Image (cartoon, rainbow, N blue to C red):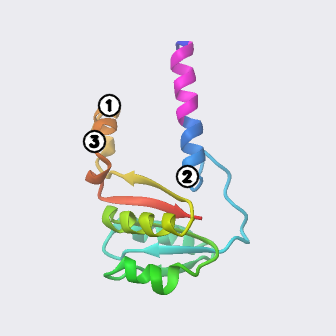
């Protein structure tokens, strides 16, 4: 491996660990006493699986329903802890704009169920909105 390739790969792994602290293997899990609310969309299989993984740890769960903007103003805006989940890209777009306007940090990463079927170069060149779901965290 060339030194330049190693440096770029290391920087990429560090960036992923910083931007996606919920990804196990890249960063240590946060303290178990942290208040975490898991948002789910029952129509997305990835969202149900993500919720099941976190529900085993005793986290709070909330279904998004049909209007995530109304949910933000009625329940999420007042939540003092971390909000995590897997939602549709359109819902994450709304949550991102609302949470950032409130001064909260928003991190996200698209999930592509067909990633294994394509090369890394083809995956990297795709637009994030083509993903079927987005994993996110609001702090």
Residue annotated with mark 3: 126
Q: CA distance from mark 1 to mark 3?
A: 9 Å
- Work out whether mark 2 precedes mark 3 in sequence or the reverse, and give the earlier one: 2
Q: Which residues are magenta?
A: 3-12
Residue sitting nearer the eye, 57 or 108: 108
Q: Is residue 94 above or below residue 25?
A: below
Residue 7 sits inside the magenta stretch: yes
Residue 77 sits inside the magenta stretch: no
Residue annotated with mark 1: 121
Q: Quadrant of the C terminus?
A: bottom right
Residue sitting nearer the eye, 104 or 9: 104
Asked if marks 2 and 1 touch (Cβ < 8 Å), the reply is: no
Instruction: Estimate the x, y position of residue 2 in percent, counting from the top left.
Output: 53, 12
Instruction: Estimate the x, y position of residue 53 in percent, counting from the top left.
Output: 53, 67
Q: CA distance from mark 2 to mark 1?
A: 22 Å
Residue annotated with mark 2: 23
Rendered residue at 38%/77% (across/down): 68
Residue sitting nearer the eye, 39 or 100: 100
């Amino acid at each position: 491996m060339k030194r330049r390739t190693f440096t770029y790969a290391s920087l990429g792994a560090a960036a992923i660990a910083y931007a996606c602290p919920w990804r196990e293997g890249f960063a240590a899990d946060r303290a178990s006493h942290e208040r975490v609310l898991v948002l789910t969309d029952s129509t997305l299989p990835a969202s149900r699986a993500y919720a099941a993984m976190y529900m085993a740890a005793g986290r709070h769960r909330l279904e998004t329903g049909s209007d995530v903007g109304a949910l933000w103003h009625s329940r999420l805006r007042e939540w003092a802890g971390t909000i995590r989940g897997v939602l549709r890209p359109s819902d994450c777009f709304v949550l991102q704009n609302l949470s950032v306007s409130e001064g909260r940090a928003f991190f996200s990463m698209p999930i592509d169920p067909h990633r294994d079927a394509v090369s890394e170069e083809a995956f990297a060149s795709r637009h994030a909105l083509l993903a079927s779901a987005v994993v996110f965290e609001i702090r």
